[in-house]
Image (cartoon, grey):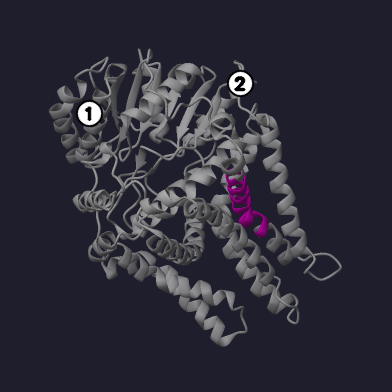
Amino acid sequence: MSIFSPVKVTGMPGYQRHWLIMALFFGTSFLVLWSNYTKFKLGGITFLEGTILFCTFICTFQPIVASWSAVIGLLVMAFGNAEKSVYPYFDAKGPLPELRSRTALVIFMRNEDPSSIFDRLLEMQKSLSQIGRLQHFRFVLLSDTTLPEVMCMEDEGFARIKDNIGIGTYQTPFYRRRSKNIGYKGGNMYDYAENHSKGDELFVPLDSDSVMSGDMLVRIVSSMEKCPQIGLLQTAFIGTPAVSAFARLMQFGSRYYLPVNYLGLSWWANDCALFWGHNAIIRTRAFQEHCKLPVLSGNPPLGGHIMSHDIVETMFMRRAGYECRLLPITTESYETFPPTLIEAMNRQNRWFQGDMQYFFLLKEPGLSLINRFQVCRILAKSLSPMAWFVMTLAFNIRSRVENPGASRVGVSVLPQWFIFRLLPKIAAFLTVVANPSEIKRYGGIFRFVTSVVLEYVITSIVSTAATVSMTLFFCGLLRGISIKWDAQNRDRLGLSWRHTFRVFWVENLIGLGIIWLMITQDTSHRLLSLAISLFLLVPITVLTASPRLSSLITRLRLFTTPDENPVSPVLSRLVAPEIITISKAKAKAMEKAL
């Protein structure tokens, strides 16, 4: 129950939006399951057929929700007014507002070279200083570093920049390193709120690779000042322009896909949006009073301290009566994408391990129905790779053991899954091609279409192979084997074939096993696509991490995003020089054309 009157939005009330998305999901899911159920033989379903239906439900959960989010986003773009019906609390175009509150920019660090982190702080300080609002902010650096050499780098680096980033702020910069890393990042964040947040009415959590422009920071602070009922406002962060072929591919897919889908997601989530861990703004006192994380029963990795803190904090903030909002504007809030597929899979495994602790939220008292629906969506999304792998095996076992003469029901599931997977991308594609000025910022229609096709093909291969990798990781979790919470590779390129094969040798062995089964047994052709994806995993990983290929793709301006045309001033010293050079050359060419 809200402690304030809700933010006023035009159109359908928030609670009706919640009921609508759930009705659309369950209605669509029922049709999918029923269409597959009718393919089974009469007289009830067997264990394998029940497994197939259950896995179908898990696999299509997130794609169905994403598809309806895209449809809603398209409708809002075409017929609605998002500034009134989705984010009336945010003024994106008006004069820069004056501020009266104090906000801490809180940066989390762990075992990473801090030089790039300090560069980002200096750019944010410069951006805020240029617009005359630096006096309303301060910098807080929270370290959980355990490596002695990195500790020295942090100490020396902070001593070097402390005076510079402190000029004009309402309080001198603060740097703290915990001696005991209790509770992962969530514990680090709560320790700040409880012990080091005096005078900070609001705070903005930032990861080591995060950066936000002064304009965006000021406007989200102003939104929180105008709307005391908002406890958390999450920005739609985007990828910092990268040189890595893999990072460019991933950030391109994310960049063109997100605007329409985030708009739809923000519309139906309304006051129950989710927190993604960084690049958000939070009401400090509300966080301190209501967002302390519990310690789960049982042993790690599924018990103990909560690894992925953000979703839990969102639920607790909303339970306390504060609204949690998603700002669906993709501008000047940035993170970096992993430079290699190996690093991306490591990150995905960390998220998966954290997500598997969320089952307790299903029975947590006081949470709203839409919040529980969101928890189910997250769990289904994380479990879908394993469900897809199990479903593929179940199809083949059923066709051979239970009903050899029957047509394979798997053929009916695949088109449905592809439709739901493609629909959000089609919606995003249409929003870009319908806007000539936006097409130019993506490098022109030829580059855009070429990039869309390449992104879809490569990510389809990778996601198919990931069903095996994630299943292997899940089996390891059940045996108590977990991924370490440690430093991340954010910019290093180059992987050897030997190292990559050492990482994915099990996947390749499984691929060989599938080929052997297809030669010696009568198995489904669907296993062939899985085997091919597993064999392509190593070459795709090596090639997309190649400095030569990355440089070539950058020069050809493939996977170009609007954030390169032009590069935001806050990123001008943070992105690779070749991207700046290409951006300036493009700007000069446009000037000559005019």
**Which is nearer the eye, 445 or 206?**
445
Residue 587 in picture, x, y percent from top left: 26, 49
Going by the numbered disc 1, the residue's amino acid type is Lys
| Quadrant of res 162 | top left
Q: Main secondary structure of the magenta part?
A: helix
State whether residue 197 is above or below residue 215.
above
Check if residue 65 falls in the magenta segment: yes
Residue 422 in picture, x, y percent from top left: 56, 59
Give the mark nearest the N terminus, 2 or 1. 2
Boundaries of the magenta span = 56-74
Going by the numbered disc 2, the residue's amino acid type is Pro
Residue plotted at (52% across, 77% down): 514
**Few, some or many residues within 10 Å of mark 2 (<14, 14–19, 20+):** some
Helix, strand or loop for disc 2: loop
Q: Which residue is mark 2?
A: 6
Check if residue 284 falls in the magenta segment: no
Residue furthest front as drawn = 594
Residue 451 appears in the picture as rendered: yes
Residues at marks 2 and 1, CA–CA distance in whole angstroms: 35 Å
**Which is nearer the eye, 386 or 128?**
128
State whether residue 525 is above or below residue 285.
below
Residue furthest right as drawn = 43
Residue furthest bottom as drawn = 520
Q: Which mark is residue 52?
A: none
Left or right side of 565 for 50: right
Q: Which mark is residue 126?
A: 1
Left or right side of 206 for 152: left
